[in-house]
Image: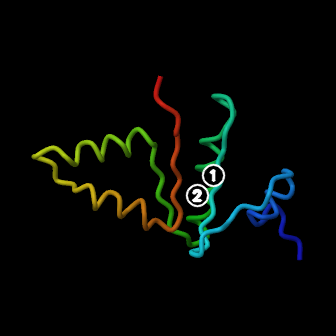
Amino acid sequence: ADRGFFFTLEEAAQLMGLPAPAIESRGRNSIVLSGANGVGKTSLAVAAGNWLIDNGHGVVYVRMDEALERLRASFDSDSTERESEIMTVYRTAPILIIDELTAAK
């Protein structure tokens, strides 16, 4: 069966000449997109997220700086969000897209 652009993490590693990564028993995998500014990493991640949503998967998208700001704000005395609630959303997301992992300039 033709799987098009679908491949396992082990197959991707093999294609790149890397050793097969150890996969957690929960079966979680990661994809990291890296490259210069403006080459389309965010667009690709959002397009993949939209495709996944269209095909019945739950997706959470967050920019790293926004996630960190929400966590920081949760420690303020007047915060309506608790750190544990925020982390639960990210920890239990079926698919979590974290954008802009590098430090803001």
Q: Residues within 10 Å of mark 1 (few under 14, many from 20)?
A: few
Q: Position of residue 102 (x, y in %)?
A: 52, 34
**Residue drawn at (51%, 49%) of the image:** 98
**Residue drawn at (22%, 48%) of the image:** 74
The reply to whether callout 2 and callout 1 are in contact (CB within 8 Å) is yes
Q: Residues within 10 Å of mark 2 (few under 14, many from 20)?
A: some
**Residue drawn at (35%, 58%) of the image:** 87
Query: Tag 2's secondary structure?
Result: helix
**Structure colour scheme:** rainbow
Query: As drawn, is 90 to the left or to the right of 3?
Result: left
User: As rendered, which of 31 and 54 lies closer to the eye?
Assistant: 31
User: As rendered, which of 10 and 100 lies closer to the eye?
Assistant: 10
Query: As drawn, is 83 to the left or to the right of 58?
Result: left
Query: As drawn, is 51 to the left or to the right of 18?
Result: left
Q: Position of residue 52 (x, y in %)?
A: 60, 64
**Residue drawn at (64%, 40%) of the image:** 41
Query: Tag 1's secondary structure?
Result: helix
Q: Position of residue 63 (x, y in %)?
A: 46, 43
Query: As drawn, is 46 to the left or to the right of 78?
Result: right
Q: Position of residue 11 (x, y in %)?
A: 82, 63
Q: Which mark is residue 50?
A: 2
- How many circles with numbers are drawn on the protein? 2
Asked if residue 79 is positioned above or below residue 59 in the image, the reply reads above
Where does the N terminus fall, quadrant-wise? bottom right
Residue at the left extreme of this rendering: 78
- The residue indicated by pointer 1 is 47
Q: Quadrant of residue 88?
A: bottom left
Mark 1 belongs to which amino acid? Answer: Ala
Mark 2 belongs to which amino acid? Answer: Asn
How far apart marks 2 and 1 lie (CA) works out to 5 Å
Residue at the top extreme of this rendering: 105
Q: Quadrant of residue 3?
A: bottom right
